[in-house]
Amino acid sequence: MKRRRESEMGSELRSAIDELSMVIIKVNPADADNQQQNTTTAYIPIKPFLSVCNLLLQVLDKIGPTMAVLRQDIYQNIQRLEKFHESEPSVYSNIVEIMKKENSEGKARKGPSCSKAFVWLTRSLDFTVTLLQLLVEDFGRDMEQAVEESYNITLKPWHGWISSAAYKVALKLVPDTKSFITILMAKDENQDILKDEMRTLISLCVPVLEGIHNILKTYELDRLKCT
């Protein structure tokens, strides 16, 4: 799956909103009377999900080398899922079916599995949403503190000391908040429009991620840590 050129996108946030609009309908299939999601029949369309992850990569590209560890991790996990999907696109268009297959073969938690790639992509999105939530509350918030708080909440609990040390170094290199906000804005935007887009993206992401975490619990992948 090729990433769209920036000139074709406008704003990464707008594009992510479009992609998530397709994911949310299918991650939360609808039985309004049933409070518990039926994870055995859940459908997570792989293409829109990976498109959102690719858009996250484009934001990290704009920031520069400061988040290289996270960027490389996201890229490798996207590639793993894309390769598996492309091996038989008609069968593996649903990420849940990929997890079912690996789980039945005893491969989900071993080696570089697609299930593990999906776990870490989900956590990267957790990190991004948490960071956006902190920033949209206050555009004057210190960027380094916001990134550190987001990391501590979403990624640090699952990282070993090597990964944690790498992120600690990266924290010292993040851009200031004003620069990051400028990076996120499209040419035709101001801060008020950007805030509206951030809030829309968060409102779409949160229920999707909640549904995904429920599915990860079903396959006992929610407590997976770095080895």
Image (cartoon, rainbow, N blue to C red):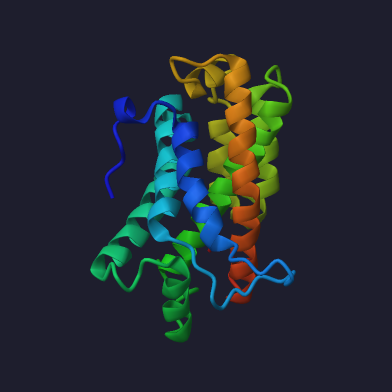
Residue 202: image quadrant is top right
Whether 204 is drawn above or below 11: the answer is: below
Question: Quick check: 8 left or right of 200?
Answer: left
Residue at image location 37% in from the left, 66% down from the top: 93
**Residue plotted at (70% across, 17% down):** 140
Say whether residue 148 is visible: no
Q: Is residue 66 left or right of residue 88?
A: right
**Nearer to me, 112 or 87:** 87
Vertical placement of 97 versus 2: above or below?
A: below
**Residue placed most toward the observer, 216 or 154:** 216
- Residue 2: which quarter of the image? top left
* The one of 146 and 212 positioned closer to us in this rendering: 212
**Image: 106 above or below 208:** below
The number of numbered discs placed on residues in the rendered structure image is 0
Q: Which residue shows up at 42% across the image and 67% down it?
A: 94
In the image, 161 versus 195, the foreground residue is 195
- Tell me where residue 5 appears, x and y as whole percent: 29, 32
Residue 112 locus on image (x, y percent): 40, 66
The reply to whether residue 53 is in sight is yes
